[in-house]
Amino acid sequence: MKNLFSIKQIDGGHTELDATPYLAATASPEVKAKMQSAFSIAEAAATPKELTEEEKQLRAKGNRYWAVCLACLAATLVMFFLGGDLGIYTAVPSLYVVNLALLAASIFFNIKAKRINRSQTMRFNENLKIDFSESTARLTEAAAEAARELGVPEDALTTDVLPYHYKEKNGKAVSTNKKGAFSNLAVTVFIKDEKLCFATAQELLSIPLSDIKGYREYNEDFELDMWLKPEEPSSGKYKAFDIRKSGFFSHKGHGYFGLLIGEDAYEVLIPCYDFEAVKALLEGNGVV
């Protein structure tokens, strides 16, 4: 059984959705070009700035402080443990003062190094305050045009699906994600002309309701590249699903469903927090 949302990674970092019997329409080349332009603007805005000469010198200075701090701390520990065992402090009591001085020096350089780290973190955070307003406006406009071309109703349900990302190696499909990890994709879902429709930003997949054969549950953990919902996973209707942050952007959860299509031909993987809404849509039309 094949994931209906199988996405192939091709040269140059581009991707394409596999063609299937259910691929009903794609956005026009003009709209696709508008989307690519919006992404290019966002990519250019998000490109990290190179460190200035002053910042490079500051980083090197911080590294030197850390090195001196560690050296002083190591000398302190060596003198403390070996000095006591060998009776050096009894023979040369002034070494107590040297030991304390080294400890004080390690604390001093630790504080200096942390101050530099803190200032660099603040500068880094300032660089992250990127203005995506232009790219967002262009992308919103292009997405609205694509939705009109693909016939997506304004009240269509939005759900996450879990695609299969892969690349070809020696003529075989090789997953680009580790087991249980997904680059989740937000799609709109609606029923039109006795067909279940999934619309991405550029494609429309249309499945006759008679081809939907039920669903199966995967009692497994999953990890999402990014949480795509406007609400936090710990709030409202998502709270019951115990979605947990697992990285800077990634989140973990448990349980997802496979909507079965055709005679063991395809399935659409839908995470637990969205499946009930899709199931209710189908049940309202006499399916599942």
Image (cartoon, grey):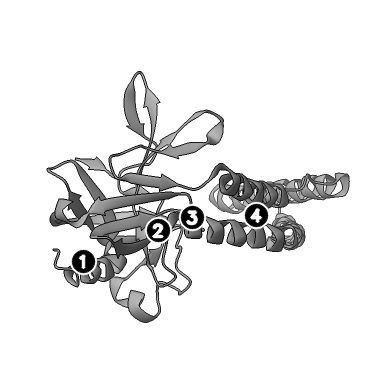
Sequence order check, earlier mark of 4 and 2: 4
Q: Residue at x 51, y 55 (%)?
A: 146
Contact? badges 4 and 2 (CB < 8 Å)? no
Given this view, does label 1 or label 2 mark the residue nearer the observer?
A: 1
Most foreground residue, 17 or 66: 17
- Judging by the rendered image, the residue that carries numbered circle 1 is 282
Most foreground residue, 18 or 128: 18
- Judging by the rendered image, the residue that carries numbered circle 2 is 187
Q: How much space separates mark 1 and mark 3, taking CA atoms? A: 24 Å
Given this view, does label 4 or label 2 mark the residue nearer the observer?
A: 2
Q: How much space separates mark 4 and mark 3, taking CA atoms? A: 85 Å
Amino acid of disc 2? Val
Farthest residue in the bottom direction?
236
Is residue 130 at least partly visible in the picture?
A: no
Amino acid of disc 4? Tyr
Q: How much space separates mark 2 and mark 3, taking CA atoms? A: 15 Å
Q: How much space separates mark 1 and mark 2, taking CA atoms? A: 16 Å
Sequence order check, earlier mark of 2 and 3: 3
User: Quick check: 287 left or right of 116?
Assistant: left
- Judging by the rendered image, the residue that carries numbered circle 3 is 149
Q: Residue at x 33, y 20 (%)?
A: 171
Q: How much space separates mark 4 and mark 2, taking CA atoms? A: 73 Å
